[in-house]
Amino acid sequence: MYRARSFMPGRRALIASTATVAVGSAYLLYRPAYAESNFSHLDKKRPGPLWSPPSRAQMLEHLKTSGTYIHRQAEGGPEPGAVLKKEEAESEGDDVFDLLIVGGGATGAGTALDAASRGLKVACVERDDFASGTSSKSTKLVHGGVRYLQKAIFELDYEQWKLVKEALKERRVFLETAPHLSHMLPILLPIYTWWQLPYYYAGCKLYDILAGKENMESAYWMGKGKAMEAFPMLKDEGLVGGVVYYDGQHNDSRMNISLVMTAASHGAIMANHVEVTQLHKRPDPARGGEERIYAASVKDRMTGEEWKVRCRGVINATGPFSDGVRKLDEPTTKEIVAPSAGVHITLPNYYGPKTMGLLDPATSDGRVIFFLPWQGNVIAGTTDSPTTVSQNPVPQEKEIQWILDEVRNYLSPDVKVRRGDVLSAWSGIRPLVMDPAAKNTQSLVRNHMINISKGGLLTIAGGKWTTYRAMAEETVDAAIKEYGLKPNGPSTTEHIKLVGGHAWSKTMYIKLIQQFGLETEVAKHLSESYGDRAWTVASMAATTGQSWPLHGVRFSPLYPYIEAEARYAVRAEYALTAVDFIARRTRLSFLNVQVTLEALPRVIDIMGEELGWDRTKKESEFDNAVEFLKSMGLPEQSTKLKLADVAKSHGNIGTLGLADSEDAKLYARAQFTPDEVSNLKKQFEDLDFDHDQHISKDDLIHAMTTMGYNASTEIADSVLREVDFGRKGFVDFQDYLDIAAGLKELQLESAFTHLAQLDTSRKLNHTKAQIGEHATDSSEQRDTRRKIPVERSGGGT
C-alpha cells in the first residue's frame, strides 16, 4: 500500500487528535479578545493618477547628497525635493538620512516602507537587483506553518505556538495589503492510512482555530472519490481520502517590486545595483567617544562611480549575505549564517489542478514537499541541504531527481514523470542564523533575529516572507531606540495597501479587455501582476495587426507576457538588465528556461531601445542572461549560445540550444521527434492488417504468419494481454506510443515489440518482402526461429 509508514502508531495518533481538538476548543473559548486587526481601516491613500516614481538618476542624486534635500513632513513620509547642489562640503548640522538600509529583498524593502511611512528619511541600496536573492526564490506560499504547529503540539513548545499565531495574523495582513498579488489556495493532504484522517483533520482544524478571526476558509475532509475528483492526478491505489486546508500564495518578486514602489511613493530613496563597499566610523561623544558608524561608501555597479552616504544608522538586511556586511563593521566577527539550499522545480500544468495544491508531509527522508499551481504551471519543492552562499546558486541534479522521485510516489502511473518535463529549476538560500548574543551561539534562531554591534550596525536576519512586515516593524522600532530617531508616530504598515492594490478588483481584467482589446489571458495576467497599474502597462501595448487581439504582442504564445511590460519595467520599475526583467519584473525564467532563451533577443532589443544599448552591450546582456539561466536549470552545455545565433534562428534553437543530440534527449519534453512519430505511425499501419485503427489478435496472428512463426489464437491472446493494460482487447495508436516509449526509455521489450519491430536497432521496412526474411525458409532451424522465446512472450507460451 502506498506510504504505509507513519509518524506514530495509530492509537497514539488518535489520542493526539482528540487532545488537539480539546486544546483548540479551549483556546477558542478563552483566547484574549484583543487581537485581531480591523482591516476596515486599511489606508486608502494611493499615489495620484499622474504619479510616477522618481527616476533612478534622481534617486542617486539624493544618495550622493545624503538626503539633505529630502524634506520632513509633519505627517506621513518625507518629500524628496530638487537637488540644488550635487556636491557640498559635509557639515555637522546637515539633516542626513536617518537610516541607510543595505539589502533590497523582502526584509530590506519592507523596512524601508515602514520607516518612510513613519516620516523617517530612508535610503535602501541593493548590490544586485531588488529581490535578486532568496526573496524571488521562495516556495511562493504565504503561510502560518502547519508543520510548526505540529511541532508545537507534540513538543509542548509555546514559542513555536506563538510563531505560528503571529504568522497567521501576518498572512491575513499580507492578503489584505496586496490583494492583486496574493490569494487563498486550498492545499490537499492525501491520506493513505485510515488513522491519519482524524489526525491530520484535527491538526488542520486547530490551525483554523489558532488563526481566529484571521482565518481564511475552514479545513475539511473528503473521501477517496472526492479526493480523486479534486486532484485526478493522484495515485488512487490505497487512497483513503484527504484533508484540505487553506493557506495563501503570492508572486514573490512582484510583491518585492510593489514594496519598493510603495516605499518610493512614501519618500524612500530606493536604488538597485548599488553596493556598499565600506562602513565609516568616528567617535561618538554621546557614547563616551565610542567608535560608531556614521556613513558608508557605495558603488554604482552600472557605472563604477563611488561616493559616501552619511546617515544616523545602518541596517543590514542582506539575508544570507549578512556576514559579508557584518565583516565590513568588524572584520574578525564570527559568522552567524548557516545557509541552507531549497531547490524547486517547475513542471507543466497537467501535473496538477489549476486551483488546488498538495502537501506531502511524509516523504522518503522525512522532508515535506509542496506541489502547487503557480502562474499557469506547477512548482514542486523543496529540499533542505547545507550549502555555501552565492548570488545565483545552481540547483544540484541529485536534488532535482529527489523531487521527481517524490512526485512519482503520489501521482497516478498515467502521469509519466520525466526529467524532460522540468521546465526550470532553482535554488534559494534560506538565511538560517545563530544569535551571537544568545547563551548558546551554536543554536539556530527559530524565527528572526535582531543584533546590534558595538559599532552600531543593526542586523536583521532570518524569518520568512509571510512575516516580512512584522520583522520590518520590529527592526524600525529597534533602530529608533538605538539611534535616537524621531518618527511621526508608530508603524502603520498593517493598514497600507501596496502600489497597485488600491483600485484593483477581481474583475478589473474585463475592463482591460474592453478598453484595449487584449486577450483574456493577457488581461488577467496584467491585472494580477500590476494591479491598478495595469492600465499604464496596457497603454504602452503595441498593436498586433490582427482583428483580435488588437493590442498586446506576446514574447511567446505559451505565456501571457507582452512586449509592453519590458518598456514599463525600464520606465517605471528600475529594470536595468535583461535578467532584471526575465527573473524579477516577469517570472519567465522561473516558468520555462527554453521559452526564456527564445524570447531573450526581443527582450534585449526592447530594453536596448529604452536604455540606449549598442551592439556590444546587447551581446553582453545576452551572455549574462545565459549565465544566469544556468541557475534556473539551463545545462552547462548551452552556454555556448550567442545572441546572433538565437536571433538569426528566430528562437528556433532546439532543446535548450543543445547541439549534442544525446544531451538534448535528456531535456526534451516530447518523447519522440516528428520523424520518429511518422515512422511509428507507419509501423502501426503495417501491423494493423485490417486497417480498423486497432491492433487485435487477428492482426497479431497475421504478423506472426507473415514473419514465419507458428501462429495460434492462444499465442496471440497471450501476446496481446502483455501490453493491453486496459483490457480493451486491442491496442490503439496511443497505446502503441506508450509501448514504444517504454522501449525507448527503459528497454521494456516484449513479444509485442518484437512482432511490431519496435527495436531501436531495427527499422520496420515498408516492403512486405523484407518483413521476416526467413519467411520462405523450410528447415529445422526455421521452425526453431519461429518459436517466440519465453522471455519475449511474458511467460505465457
Image (cartoon, grey):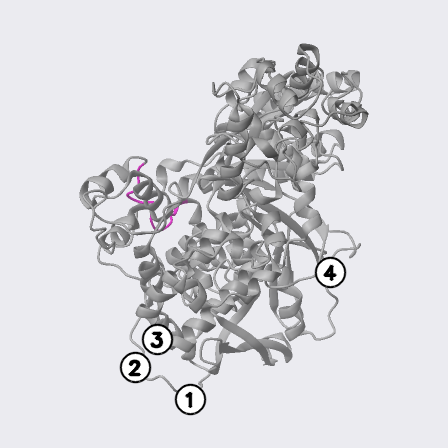
* Of pointers 4 and 2, the one earlier in the residue sequence: 2
Residue at x 57% of width, y 56% of height = 634
Residue 442 screen position, x and y as percent? 79, 55
Q: Which mark is residue 436?
A: 4
**Residue identifier under label 1:** 89
- Name the N-terminal-most of marks 3 and 1: 3
Direction bottom: furthest residue: 89
How dense is the environment of label 4, judged by Cα within 10 Å: few (below 14), some, or many (20 and up)?
some
Cα separation between marks 2 and 1: 13 Å
Q: Secondary structure at mark 3?
A: loop
Whether residue 618 sits left or right of residue 281 in the image: it is left
Asked if one can make out residue 26 in the rendered structure from this viewpoint, the answer is no
- The residue singled out by tag 3 in the image is 69
Residue 405, position as x, y percentages in the image: 68, 37
Residue under pointer 2: 84
Q: Is residue 499 magenta?
A: yes
Q: Is residue 580 magenta?
A: no
Q: Which badge, 4 or 3, is on the more N-terminal residue?
A: 3
Q: Residue type at mark 1: give it.
A: Ala
User: Residues under labels 4 and 2: Cα distance?
Assistant: 44 Å
Q: Residues within 10 Å of mark 3 (few under 14, many from 20)?
A: many
Decide: few, some or many residues near mark 1? Use Cα within 10 Å; few <14, some 14-19, many ≥20.
few
Residue type at the position of mark 3:
Tyr
The three-letter amino acid code for the residue at tag 2 is Leu
For marks 2 and 1 on the same chain, the one whose residue lies earlier in the sequence: 2
Q: Label 4's element? A: loop
Q: Is residue 264 visible?
A: yes
Q: Position of residue 396 (x, y in %)?
A: 68, 53
Magenta segment boundaries in residue numbering: 495-505
Is disc 3 in contact with disc 2, using a CB cutoff of under 8 Å?
Answer: yes
- The structure residue drawn at horizontal position 77% and vertical position 52%, both measured from the top left corner, is 443
